[in-house]
Amino acid sequence: MLSRVRLSFIGCGAMAEAIIAGLLKNQLLKAEQVVGSHPRKERRAELQAKYGIRIVENNRAAVALGHSSADAKDLEKASSIVILTVKPQRLDALLIDLRGVVAQDQLVLSIVAGARIETIANDLLHRSIVRAMPNTPAQIGQGMTVWTATPEVSEAQLVQIHTILGSLGRELHVTEEKMIDMATALSATGPTYIFLVMEALIDAGVHLGFSRHMAQELVLQTMLGSVLFAQESRKHPAELRNMVTSPGGTSAEAIYQMEKGGLRTVLSKAVWAAYQRATALGRKVNLEACL
């Protein structure tokens, strides 16, 4: 499916490496199909040694190399995808630098937080764009990525994106870009909520008398098992909660205290605040790109 695809990674940080590792591990492409760029010599050497891929210093060169490889005579009907993985604060300068370099037949995949399609399209003078928002567990192939595409993206390219983002875990294609900001608040920021709950439960375990190591093992396995059980049972979380809540029991008492403390409201407000922040950052990135 990706045998005739060439990928150019612009900015080879943790998420770019997660995609590269996932694709190579699942044998969805070969190392020679990948080229990337990174400003630090040490990072370039690290990725080249680890994955056998070509990493250059210059962003424009990485884009051109990916496209020239796709045009090679022995790669009939090959395609090229430029993957933007830089920090949001570097995006403006990057897009200006790449304007006129990205060919019209290349697909641009952006996983830059807050960067809207309109911003990328206007600065690159390019319309075939996919915007995606993965989360941290993608680094171990257990992520959740939500993505959307412009109408100019072909059916064949959509299939390629399904495959690429699927290497990070689960992926969900949405038709409205506003859902990316919504996903930023729920799934992309979601691990933060989970980690905080983990931390609080571990601290509670230590307060009870467990060693921190024991408390952490109990909490992590309990959370992992609960998630897998919920996925396998396909039941609503409320139904699962009722299954383990006996009248007058420990679970009932614990739930009473959490409801009394407003846990649901706190979580809801946190997600809503994250959504508002995501939309504000999107406006900021878009504004800076227009200045």
Image (cartoon, grey):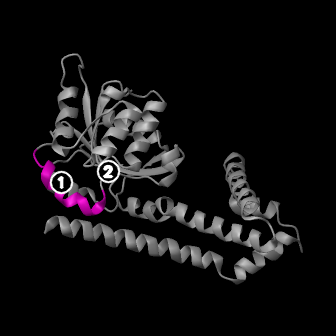
Residue sticking out furthest to the right: 248
Residue at 18%, 17% (x, y): give it. 73
Is 126 placed left or right of 41 in the picture? left
Give the percent coordinates (x, y) of residue 101.
12, 43
Mark 1: amino acid:
Leu
Where disc 1 sits, the SS reads helix
Crowdedness near tag 1: few (<14), some (14–19) or many (≥20) residues, C-alpha within 10 Å: many
Give the percent coordinates (x, y) of residue 128.
23, 44
Residue at 66%, 71% (x, y): give it. 200
Q: Nearer the viewer, residue 134 or 210?
A: 210
Q: What's drawn in magenta, residue-wise? A: 87-100
Identify the residue position indicated by label 1 in the image. 95
Identify the residue position indicated by label 2 in the image. 85
Tell me if residue 269 can be seen: yes
Residue 261 sits in which quadrant? bottom right
Residue 279's tag is none
Where disc 2 sits, the SS reads loop
Give the percent coordinates (x, y) of residue 48.
34, 35
Q: Main secondary structure of the magenta part?
A: helix
Give the percent coordinates (x, y) of residue 169.
51, 43
Residue at 65%, 64% (x, y): give it. 198
Residue sticking out furthest to the bottom: 260
